[in-house]
Image (spheres, rainbow, N blue to C red):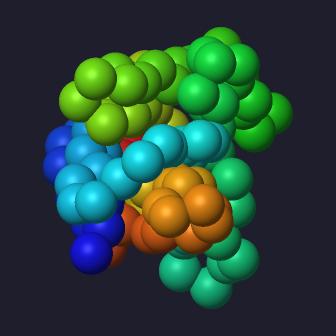
Amino acid sequence: QVQLVESGGGLVQTGGSLRLSCAASGTIFRINTMGWYRQAPGKQRELVAAITSGGSTNFADSVKGRFTISRDNAKNTVYLQMNSLQPEDTAAYYCNAGIRIMGREYEYWGQGTQVTVSS
């Protein structure tokens, strides 16, 4: 079984920073795109940032210039560095990965980690 385990959420003041980590474990042949989504109360889950196995990145317009995404392929881990955090960044953040196992790709989600930005 494959698991994605997130860490690094918490409470921070406006303008502060947090770093989220997500480590994949289990029987993994290859991890393709890894990403972070978030969901605020009463809102739909939205893509925050994604990174391909080759290092190409994609960001939501609302976080461009403030958030960076990176990955350590040797550790099957993706990171989200969040700077200049704003109250509207408050949400549950979920790790997502497309993982190739036995010739097929499966999508996995982490359990979520809460980020709360106080004003």
Report whether residue 84 is seen: no
Q: Residue visible at 27% across and 75% down?
A: 1
Residue 116, picture quadrant: bottom left
Vertical comparison of 110 with 31: above or below: below
The residue most toward the right is 61
Q: Residue at x 70, y 77 (%)?
A: 44
* Image coords of residue 94 (percent x, y): 44, 61
Q: Which residue shows up at 23% across the image and 30% down it?
A: 75
Which quarter of the image is occupied by the C terminus?
A: top left
Residue 53's place in the image compared with 97, above or below, is above
| Nearer the observer, 34 or 118 | 34
Above/below status of 18 relative to 106: above
Vertical placement of 4 versus 80: above or below?
A: below
Residue 43 image-quadrant placement: bottom right
> In the drawing, does residue 117 fall left or right of residue 21?
right
Whole-percent x, y for residue 88 in the image:
57, 51
Q: Which residue occupies 51% across, 55% down?
A: 99
Of residues 101 and 106, the one drawn nearer to the viewer in this rendering = 101
Q: Where's residue 14, x and y in %?
A: 38, 33
In this image, 107 relative to 93: left or right?
A: right
* Residue 54 makes an appearance in the image: yes
Label total for image? 0
Percent position of residue 50, x then y: 63, 38
**Residue lying furthest bottom:** 42
Considering depth in this image, is 117 or 32 the residue closer to the camera? 32
Could you tell whether 102 is left or right of 13 in the image?
right
